[in-house]
Amino acid sequence: MKRVLAAVGALGVGALLLSAPAGAATSSPGSVRAGEASGAPDAARVRCDEGRWPLTVEGEPRNFNPGDPAGYRIWHDGTGWHLRTTTPTDGDHVFRGVIRSADDVVVVNEVRDEPADIVRSEGHLIAFEFHTHDHIDGLDFRVGCTDHVSFNLQANGAQVPAARIWLGKVGRAPGNPFTVFRGR
């Protein structure tokens, strides 16, 4: 635990947190919203249902393979949320980011193979650093009853352009940072 906390301090996560304050979820440059729900089922049950996210984030990206163009692949499916990084070269590419939610987020699986890779999850936040070569690193997570999930993503010390963030089967991020809203 001490190693993880010390490593997170080395991440520069503080700078990421300052650039994406807690209120940034509604004021981020990009957002994706699900369509309005029809009918009025029990609000708590609908709100906590893992489904009902926009179609633009549903399903694993088509033809996603190790060594694809450098960037992020993010999608949702019946098991929760998934974030992956990959690059076309074996050089060290450092991917850092923060994922926020209004409810607790829980990492359920880590996909990493370099000893320097770090994932920290605490309450409403996940912070990560992946040293990705020509393979895949990433994590799987669940977001509980939140109505939105926000992403602030970097690579090699700079904000990643939206064109390098693939969402769902064929979508792209609307900006970076960005927020995905659950259907209501």
Image (tube, rainbow, N blue to C red):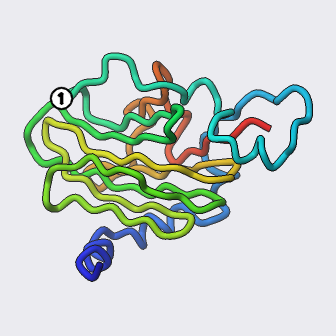
Q: Name which residue lies at 25% across and 73% down.
A: 7
Does residue 130 appear to the left or right of 40 in the view shown? left
Q: Name which residue lies at 58% across and 62% down.
A: 104
Q: Name which residue lies at 39% across and 42% down.
A: 83
Most foreground residue, 39 or 70:
39
Q: Quadrant of residue 24?
A: bottom right
Badge 1 density bin: few <14, some 14–19, many ≥20, Cα 10 Å: some
| Quarter of the image that includes the N terminus | bottom left
**Name of the residue lying farthest toward the bottom:** 2
In the image, what residue type sits under mark 1? Gly
Q: Where's residue 180, x and y in %? A: 61, 41
Does residue 180 appear to the left or right of 12 in the view shown? right
Q: Where's residue 62, x and y in %? A: 38, 17
Q: Up-down: is 24 above or below 86? A: below
Q: How many marks?
A: 1
Q: Name which residue lies at 62% across and 65% down.
A: 22
Q: Which residue is mark 1?
A: 67
Q: Up-down: is 126 above or below 134? A: below
Q: Quadrant of residue 72?
A: top left
| Quarter of the image that includes the C terminus | top right
Q: Up-down: is 140 above or below 117? A: above
Q: Where's residue 56, x and y in %? A: 57, 25
**Name of the residue lying farthest toward the left:** 90
Question: Mark 1 falls on what kind of element?
Answer: loop
Does residue 47 appear to the left or right of 67 in the view shown? right
Q: Where's residue 178, x and y in %? A: 56, 44
Most foreground residue, 111 or 35:
111
